């Protein structure tokens, strides 16, 4: 049975069980003697409003899709609250047995604990879902790297950190040479496989502080915070070797990709677009020389 089918069956059963327990509790409370003094209208009104609200919460919870971790604590908490309200109704008109008074106190404590647990779990799931949504919106679906829009956002943030703390920032651009010809010969599906494998390989190499991005049809961008030019050039060389070692098999043919790498360091007072344009110019110069090399500015 699927989870949705289980929910359709179990939720109404839980609701019926709650009503049965409420009926038993009210029946038990009715065994007490009637009170001589009449309850106040304010007490009736206040309890009536609370009872309607709690019942509404239970009905909404039963009819709304939620994870088990959220549904069961909240249902138990609101259910206990509903039962406690039933006993409180009886307290207005009857003398309640001490045993039922103990049950009443336990229900109130239990309801607060379970509702708190349910709300905490709901908050954690909501935060996790929000983080997942933000990650998906910033990620290139093919390579698993960040997309170009997110790259420019983070580049601006990194430049502000450089200005504030006097740190260094390097940018590495990597181009897969002749990928267009590879696509024309073997199809875009094979070309996508090349980009996907390269993206995963880049992800496996970078530090936690580095950021890899899909940058154009056949290019990747790597932001290297707190990295001098020499260190960035070494990263570029190692990534070139790492990606060149990837082998792509199409039928009986085996292919390795030629890669051109440009490495630039952020200059004082340089804007983000200026840094990117310098890297792209260096990449074009390297490509015009035949590609398959690492150039640094």
Image (spheres, rainbow, N blue to C red):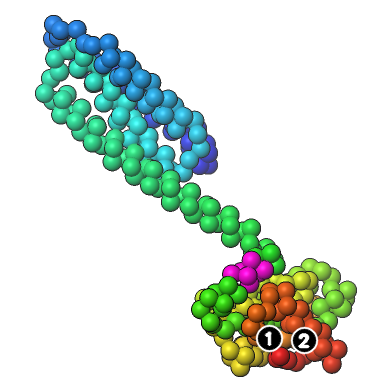
Q: Is residue 15 left or right of residue 161?
A: left
Tell me what residue is drawn at x 42 percent, y 25 percent: 56
Distance between mark 2 and mark 1 Cα atoms: 8 Å
**What percent of the width, then of the height, locates residue 104?**
20, 27
Q: Residue 89, located in which quarter of the rendered image?
A: top left
Q: Is residue 254 left or right of residue 107?
A: right
Q: Was residue 86 drawn as part of the magenta stretch in this picture? A: no
Query: Front-most of 44 and 243?
Result: 44
Q: Which residue is mark 1?
A: 264
**What percent of the width, then of the height, locates residue 99?**
13, 25
Q: Which residue is mark 2?
A: 282
Query: Circle 2 — which element?
Result: helix
**What percent of the width, then of the height, locates residue 225?**
56, 80
Tell me what residue is drawn at x 23 percent, y 36 percent: 109
User: Which residues are the magenta region?
Assistant: 151-158
Residue 71 lies, with reference to residue 278, above or below; the image says: above
């Amino acid at each position: 049975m699927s989870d949705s089918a289980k929910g359709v069956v179990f939720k109404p059963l839980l609701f019926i069980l709650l009503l049965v327990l409420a009926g038993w509790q009210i029946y038990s409370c009715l065994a007490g003697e009637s009170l001589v003094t009449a309850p106040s209208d304010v007490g009736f009104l206040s309890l009536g409003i609370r009872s309607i609200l709690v019942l509404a919460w239970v009905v909404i919870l039963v009819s709304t899709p939620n994870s088990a971790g959220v549904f069961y604590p909240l249902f138990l908490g609101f259910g206990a609250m509903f039962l406690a309200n039933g006993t409180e109704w009886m307290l207005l008109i009857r003398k309640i047995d001490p045993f039922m008074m103990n049950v009443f106190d336990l229900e109130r404590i239990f309801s607060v604990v379970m509702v708190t647990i349910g709300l905490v779990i709901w908050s954690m799931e909501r935060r996790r879902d929000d983080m997942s949504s933000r990650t998906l919106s910033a990620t290139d679906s093919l390579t698993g790297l960040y997309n170009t829009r997110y790259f420019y956002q983070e580049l601006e943030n990194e430049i502000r950190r450089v200005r504030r703390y006097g740190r260094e920032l390097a940018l590495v651009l990597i181009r897969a040479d002749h990928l267009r010809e590879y696509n024309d010969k073997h199809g875009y599906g094979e070309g996508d496989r090349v980009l996907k494998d390269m993206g995963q390989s880049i992800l496996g190499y970078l530090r936690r502080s580095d950021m890899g991005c899909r940058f154009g049809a056949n290019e990747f961008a790597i932001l290297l915070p707190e990295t001098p030019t020499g260190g960035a050039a070494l990263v570029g060389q190692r990534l070139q070797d790492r990606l060149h070692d990837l082998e792509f098999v199409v039928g009986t043919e085996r292919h390795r990709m030629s890669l051109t790498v440009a490495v630039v360091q952020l200059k004082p007072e340089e804007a983000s677009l200026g840094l990117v344009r310098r890297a792209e110019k260096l990449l074009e110069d390297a490509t015009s020389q035949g590609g398959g090399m690492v150039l640094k500015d």
